[in-house]
Image (cartoon, rainbow, N blue to C red):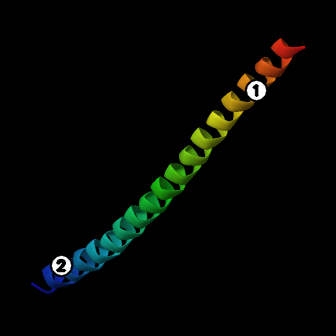
């Protein structure tokens, strides 16, 4: 019975450790998802600006 109790405590300890690691990974995933979202919006903004500049360049080239 003592061996079973020792093994049970070890498994509980391992479960708690894995639970903490899981929570840490979820938090890291959320942080990275937020960062990706921010970078994607910046990419979209720059893409629109690039297209606007190309259009402006073509308009100016057509005038000359």
1 vs 2, front mark: 1
Q: In the displayed orientation, state which residue is furthest to the left.
A: 1
Horizontally, is 51 left or right of 10 in the view? right
Label at residue 20:
none
- Binning the other alpha carbons within 10 Å of mark 2 as few (below 14), some (14 to 19) or many (20 upward) gives few
- The residue indicated by pointer 2 is 8
Residue at 30% x, 73% y is 14
**On screen, residue 54 above or below 3:** above
For marks 1 and 2, the one nearer the N-term is 2
Q: In the displayed orientation, state which residue is furthest to the front.
A: 63
* Residue 58: % across, % down: 78, 18
* Residue 16: % across, % down: 29, 77
Label at residue 56:
1
Real-space Cα separation, disc 1 to disc 2, in angstroms: 71 Å
Q: Quadrant of residue 24?
A: bottom left
Element marked by disc 1: helix
Q: Nearer the viewer, residue 26 or 19?
A: 26
Residue at 22% x, 83% y is 9
**On screen, residue 10 above or below 62:** below
- Binning the other alpha carbons within 10 Å of mark 1 as few (below 14), some (14 to 19) or many (20 upward) gives few
Element marked by disc 2: helix
Q: Nearer the viewer, residue 48 or 38?
A: 48
């Amino acid at each position: 019975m003592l061996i079973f109790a020792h093994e049970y405590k070890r498994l509980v300890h391992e479960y708690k450790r894995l639970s903490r690691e899981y929570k840490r990974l979820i938090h890291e995933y959320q942080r990275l998802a937020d960062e990706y979202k921010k970078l994607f919006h910046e990419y979209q903004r720059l893409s629109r600006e690039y297209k606007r500049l190309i259009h402006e360049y073509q308009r100016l080239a057509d005038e000359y």
